Image (tube, rainbow, N blue to C red):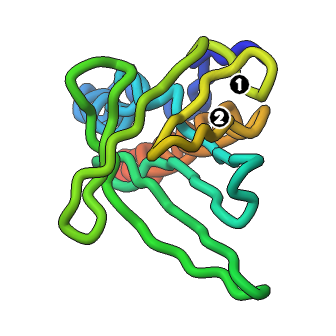
Amino acid sequence: MKKEINLKVDDFVAEMMAKHPELQAMKEELSFWQKDPRAKLLGEWVCEDLPSVEFKITVEDNYFLLSICITKWGESDYSYYPLHKGETDRLYYFIRKGKIVEMMIQGDMDYDGEEDGPQMCIDGYCFTQVEGSCAFIQENQAMTDDDTVGIAAMEYIN
């Protein structure tokens, strides 16, 4: 499935941003993630060789969050790390237990799913992006951004 960041803006939010430049500035600040190459990494990542490990990349406040879920004996253990950009658009890293863990992205970042999409390689294991999860996270984040601006816009009514 081809990934495109082509997100709609709520009509009320668009109208209020046109009238109030400070709301437009707020929207641009909240939408920083849309211009970042990590936006194509949003979603869930799984590995056939490590079925008990799952990654999820989301946007939190002003950074990208990497959540790692490890399931053992029916119990799930979660850990969370900021996801940092490396030297290229295909190299990323996070810091776990004081060590830098590099993530290399292979494949076509404009698609998701096993067949055409990217692979995230970490310590010799390759994770594939769950098909549709990137678009789902992007759409939800865009709605959250619009909701935040919409709440601020309510102050200008009346």
Q: Amino acid at mark 1?
A: Asp
Which residue, given by chain and number where applicable, does mark 2 sit on?
134
Residue 150 visible in rendering: no
Horizontal and vertical percent for residue 13?
50, 34
Front: mark 1 or 2: 1
Q: Earlier in the sequence, mark 1 or mark 2?
A: 1
As drawn, is 70 to the left or to the right of 131?
A: left
Residue labelled with disc 1: 112
Residue located 47% across and 30% down the image: 39
Residue 35 visible? The answer is yes
Mark number for residue 34?
none
Residue 139 image-quadrant placement = top right
In the picture provided, is 25 more to the left or to the right than 136? left
Tag 1 near tag 2, CB within 8 Å: yes
Which secondary structure, mark 2?
Answer: helix
* Quadrant for the N terminus in the image: top right
Q: Nearer the viewer, residue 140 or 58?
A: 58
Q: Residue at x 65, y 47 (%)?
A: 44
Q: Is residue 121 above or below residue 108?
A: below
- Taking depth in this image into account, of 23 and 113 the one nearest to the observer is 113
Whether residue 94 is situated above or below residue 131 in the rendered picture: below
112 shown above or below 63:
above
Distance CA(mark 1)–CA(mark 2): 7 Å
User: Residue flagged by tag 2: what amino acid is it?
Assistant: Cys
The crowding category of the residue bearing disc 1, from other C-alpha atoms within 10 Å (few below 14, some 14 to 19, many at least 20), is many
The residue at 40%/38% (across/down) is 103
Q: Residue at x 30, y 64 (%)?
A: 96
Pinpoint residue 128: horizontal percent, then vertical percent: 68, 36
Judged from this view, the residue extending furthest toward the front is 124
Q: Nearer the viewer, residue 152 or 99?
A: 99
